[in-house]
Image: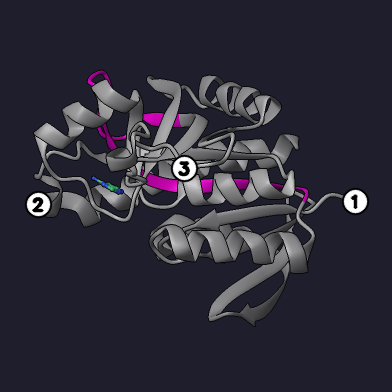
Amino acid sequence: TQVIGLIGAMDEEVELLLGQLENKETTVRAGVTYASGTIHGKQVVVCKSGVGKVNAAVTTQILIDFFGVSNILFTGVAGALHPELNIGDIVISSSCMQHDMDVTPLGFARGVIPYQELSDFPADASLIQLAEEACKEQAVNHYIVGKVLSGDQFIASRDTVQTLYEELNGACAEMEGSAVAQVCYMNGVPYVVIRSMSDKADGSAHVNFPEFTVKASKRSHEIVNYMLGKL
Ligand code: ADE
């Protein structure tokens, strides 16, 4: 039977899933608590990875090795890069790439991981399709299927937003998705990242980040919850 791995980086992003979990059992590995159980009768493992690519990578590999997950859904918030995205809107990952991978001094394009075939890791087509269906069913006014850019940086300037959008074609910026994506790719595990916009990555986030994070996390959770009912 399939086991679905569910990851968020922060408490706000996973608490709604944890609240739904039935027959809950917890295990701690590498400092992260993995909560196994069922949601809508589906076997799942929910965890809070912590912020950043290293936390996300370790967590993803543990989900695969120790919990044998069949696929991974990431739920959370992000900063909008695409000019048409507003706070609360959804980005479904078409792929994920690390915007802070920079070996340009050796002639590699920004975001390219040297000496390997892939740096922009495609999400699973059927998970993308299901996420789109969820947005339509949940009457999410605005969603985009686009490239998720990750880096160990909180983006907070208009100039950076413009560069990441124009140079790398990013729809949103966050700090974990491409680590999850890369580890999933290395292990042949399907994934998709669902992100709701908590801010516009323009330097105004500190004003209302906590408030918008709670609201945006709910949005992202609604999508994932719908998907869990159908998987
Ligand atoms: N997560 C939410 N907003 C973000 C931003 N502006 N940059 C990086 N990660 C984020």
- Inter-mark Cα distance, 1 to 2: 45 Å
- Whichever of labels 2 and 3 marks the residue nearer the N terminus, that label is 3
Q: Where is 107 relative to 187, above or below?
A: above
Pointers 1 and 2 in contact (C-beta within 8 Å): no
Number of the front mark, 2 or 3: 3
Q: Where's residue 109, x and y in %? A: 35, 31
Q: Where's residue 201, x and y in %? A: 19, 40
Type of amino acid at the residue the image marks with label 1: Thr
- State the image quarter where residue 12 is shown: bottom left
Q: Secondary structure at mark 2?
A: helix
Q: Is residue 73 magenta?
A: yes
Type of amino acid at the residue the image marks with label 2: Val
Q: Residue at x 22, y 20 (%)?
A: 83
Q: How many marks?
A: 3
Please give the residue where the numbered disc 2 appears in the rendered image: 207
Q: Where's residue 178, x and y in %? A: 48, 45
Q: Secondary structure at mark 1?
A: loop
- Inter-mark Cα distance, 2 to 3: 35 Å
- State the image quarter where residue 147 is shown: top left
Q: Secondary structure at mark 3?
A: loop
Q: Nearer the viewer, residue 128 or 212?
A: 128
Please give the residue where the numbered disc 1 appears in the rendered image: 1
Q: Is residue 29 magenta?
A: no
Please give the residue where the numbered disc 3 appears in the rendered image: 113
